[in-house]
Amino acid sequence: MISNFAKNLKIHNSITNKKESFKPIEKNNVGMYVCGPTVYSNAHLGNCRTFISFDLIFRYLKYLGYNVRYVRNLTDVGHLENEDENGEDKVSKKARLEKIEPMEVVQKYTLDFHDVLKKFNTLPPSIEPTASGHIIEQIQSIKQIIKSGYGYEVNGSVYFDIEKFNQSNKYGKLSGRNSDDMLNNSRDLDGSSDKKNPQDFALWKKADKSHIMNWESPWSNGFPGWHLECTSMSKKYLGDRFDIHGGGIDLKFPHHDCEIAQSEAIDGKNPANFWMHANMLTLNGKKMSKSTDNFVLPGQIFDGKNKIFSKPFNPNVLKFFMYQAHYRSVLDLSNDALLASEKGLSKLISGFQLIFELECNENESDFNVDKWVSNCFDKLNDDFNTPMLIAELFECVKFLNNVKIKSKNLNIVDKETIEKIFNSILFEILGFDLNNDEPNEKDSKTELIELLIKIRSQARENKNFKLSDEIRDELLSLGIKLNDNKNDSSFELI
Ligand code: AMP
Ligand code: ZN
């Protein structure tokens, strides 16, 4: 059954730049497509912010009672370096550098991505299709685009004809950018491109000899352009028109504008009713990004092994930190911000847990629970306004504290309602997982071993070989073998 709260849900639509009432195309069913990661390196905390934002949206839509089909792809081919038509494929490059198979790269970073998102207690999507698993569908999409007159082939590669498209449509509906911007975005440094116009983008690229990932097609042995996979896979799993298409704000242009153009070329339809964009996580005021070396991995924050933060922080604290900002606002990561979030979350959880020890009466209550519940859902319905929702939760905590010191009264019926709604918001909708609060046993063990290694090195420097041998032997008897290198030691568990 769909909750009564569902009818008030408003979502900001990037296409109209307005908050609009949300109503699914198909009663009770919601189709949501979110552009997933390119699996060529570890997901950094910025990537995670986007996926945590969409996890909240997925969770809330499910909470409201909708059947949600959530499709989030994995880009394992076709995403080229520097968004450059002649750049090297990101996965292939990693495979070349690490001297492994491209699919080994994909496997390694897909596992890492899943592992990290699991630590944040995000729900898995309903379908997680890969670009390389949908080459047939992408070839089909290209055939349709060529047939409708917006794609052309040159020397085995196929391009999207933006000039032709603009004669009857408008490229850049989402970002408001136009084909001139596309021109500035495209690099044709040596003038060797086959494109009619530099702003055209690739649908299919003929593979040169060095390109290991390639497939047969009517045009050449090659590989699909990056923008195409999302068009083909969203159509396959959600149909020509579905409810929500999301991603990070940096994907608006050119990726999502190209997706819209491709879909319109195929069937005349903008694929999504709502386009949603999560804003960027920044570090030192700049977008968190691998390519500028301005990033931190979630694992480095969980175990405290980084040069940025004074202590480790658990996934709940990082999530709480993210939810304290609206998903469409830029958010800057810093030590002070995480320390404040850690305090805030602990106050919120312990405040809520007070409810289990409060004395209640039969009739009197000094809290308008119905109003509080509707305020909480108003905030969620206002384009998933988590900072305002958190403020409502703290309002309730303030009241519970007053009940504890007996300056306010709470009756048993209201107590049960608060408990139920608070629980649902914290765990079902915001997806906190208190089991994540425990320090990781393995990490503290590792830290202890590292401390002993440090003491032993000191002993060796002081020529106290008795102590150093003792530490080595004692550790060995515990199944921890030290391997001495020239300047330091490493350990292995045996
Ligand atoms: P990529 O693997 O680069 O394709 O990125 C995966 C997702 O992470 C995309 O939706 C990006 O928009 C998003 N993303 C990348 N950098 C950031 C960041 N600093 N903050 C938030 N989201 C990001
Ligand atoms: Zn995409």
Image (cartoon, helix red, strand yellow):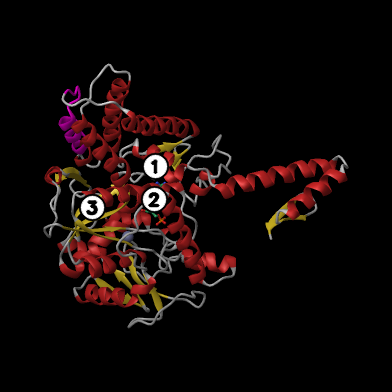
Residue 388 % position (x, y): 27, 33
Q: To which residue does mark 3 refer?
A: 62
Q: Are marks 2 and 1 in contact (CB under 8 Å)?
A: yes
Lower position in the chain sequence, tag 2 or tag 1: 2
Q: To which residue does mark 1 refer?
A: 319
Q: Which residues are magenta?
A: 364-378
Q: Secondary structure at mark 1?
A: helix
Q: Is residue 384 above or below residue 343?
A: below
Asked whether the viewer can see residue 88, the reply is no
Residue 121: numbered disc: 2
Task: Assess disc 1: are there few (<14), some (14-19) or many (≥20) residues with their C-alpha within 10 Å of its C-alpha.
Answer: many
Residue 151 % position (x, y): 26, 72
Asked whether the viewer can see residue 326, the reply is yes
Q: Amino acid at mark 3?
A: Lys
Residue 58 % position (x, y): 27, 52
- Residue lying at the far top in this picture: please name it: 407
